[in-house]
């Protein structure tokens, strides 16, 4: 069998510092902004000349945190409550042969500062430090298929969860002038209900935590409601 070597063209700087609570697909949380920082020979403006003509890009990346953990032919998509199995190639699961992911994201701008080339992106579903192996423009005339159907993942996931904030959390957010969208960001992440599928069936109150930017966010789930209890700096 032929083996290939691929090298990263750059790395993602993302507010998502851990896998838990990252949305399951891109563009579900528009406030998720990231920088794609080019590396090595790819840190040259020629590589992106003309890219700002495109509003959206495909990113091909390596699921670097899980890629060495192997794969199986059958996986349990969270959409199906974790109860049913589908072939890995019929899903967007992270544990897959070659550990390659793809996400269509919004291009907000191109930056060249202090001899460092970067793309400014939003709506990302990528962990901080994710290696990017290729970038291609999104072509609506070919990539957008309005008559396509998508079986068990045919519609945008429902976001029935409501979100509220404790007084401490409200006050903490109000002070973070560097992140004016922080509250909306947290709301949209929690509305996606990041809990693993099997936990959603449990009725009792549950507590969770996630890292966004340099913040630890703790919340409590009660039925269909998320209450952000406390936000602290790491
Ligand atoms: N849009 C991509 C795709 O379809 O290939 C990713 C879909 S995958 C279901 C999304 C999940 O990948 C996120 O919820 C997050 O937990 C996980 N993830 C993101 N970046 C990762 C990384 N670098 N390594 C491992 N897992 C990652």
Image (cartoon, grey):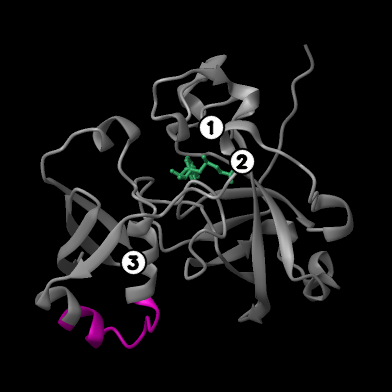
Locate the C terminus and report the quarter of the image it occupies: bottom left
In the figure, residue 115 lies in which quadrant?
bottom right
Q: Is mark 1 within 8 Å of ligand 1?
A: yes
Residue 69, above or below 213? above
Q: Earlier in the sequence, mark 3 or mark 1?
A: 1
Provide the secondary structure element on which disc 3 rests: helix
What percent of the width, then of the height, locates residue 205? 11, 45
Name the one closer to the observer, 8 or 78.
78
Name the one closer to the observer, 88 or 193.
193
In this view, the residue farthest toward the top is 1
Q: Is mark 2 within 8 Å of ligand 1?
A: no
Q: Earlier in the sequence, mark 3 or mark 2?
A: 2
Mark 1 or 2, closer to the camera:
2
Residue 137, above or below 182? above
Mark 3 or 2, closer to the camera:
2
Real-space CA distance between mark 3 and mark 1, rounded to the nearest whole angstrom:
25 Å
Q: Give neighbour class at mark 2: few <14, some 14-19, many 20+ (Cα, 10 Å).
A: few
Real-space CA distance between mark 1 and mark 2, rounded to the nearest whole angstrom:
16 Å
Provide the secondary structure element on which disc 2 rests: loop
Task: Please report the residue visible at 51 percent of the width from the left and 39 percent of the height from the top.
Answer: 64
Is residue 49 at least partly visible in the picture? no
Labels 3 & 2 near each other (Cβ < 8 A): no
Q: Which residue is mark 2?
A: 154
Name the one closer to the observer, 86 or 122.
86
- State left or right for residue 22 relative to residue 92: left
In the figure, residue 101 lies in which quadrant?
top right
Q: Which residue is mark 3?
A: 187
In the figure, residue 198 lies in which quadrant?
top left
Q: Which residues are magenta?
A: 171-182
Task: Please report the residue visible at 29 percent of the width from the left and 67 percent of the height from the top.
Answer: 214
Labels 1 & 2 near each other (Cβ < 8 A): no
- State left or right for residue 179 relative to residue 9: left
């Amino acid at each position: 069998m032929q083996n290939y070597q691929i090298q990263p063209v750059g790395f993602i700087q993302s507010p998502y510092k851990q896998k838990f609570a990252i949305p399951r697909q891109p563009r579900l949380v528009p406030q998720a902004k990231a920088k794609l920082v080019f590396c090595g020979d790819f840190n040259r403006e020629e590589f992106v000349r003309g890219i700002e003509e495109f509003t959206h890009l495909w990113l091909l990346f390596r699921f670097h945190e899980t890629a060495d953990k192997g794969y199986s032919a059958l996986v349990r998509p969270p959409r199906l409550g974790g109860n049913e199995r589908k072939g890995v190639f019929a899903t967007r699961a992270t544990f897959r042969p070659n550990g390659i992911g793809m996400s269509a994201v919004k291009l907000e701008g191109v930056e060249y500062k202090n001899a460092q080339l970067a793309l400014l992106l939003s709506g990302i579903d990528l962990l901080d430090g994710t290696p990017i192996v290729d970038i291609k423009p999104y072509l609506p005339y070919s990539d957008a298929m309005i008559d396509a159907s998508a079986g068990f993942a045919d519609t945008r996931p429902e976001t029935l969860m409501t979100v509220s904030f404790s007084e401490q959390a409200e006050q903490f957010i109000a002070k973070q002038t560097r992140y004016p969208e922080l509250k909306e960001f947290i709301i949209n992440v929690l509305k996606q209900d990041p809990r693993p599928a099997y936990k959603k069936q449990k009725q009792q109150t549950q507590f969770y935590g996630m890292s966004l930017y340099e913040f630890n966010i703790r919340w409590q789930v009660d039925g269909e409601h998320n209450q952000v209890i406390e936000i602290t700096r790491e």
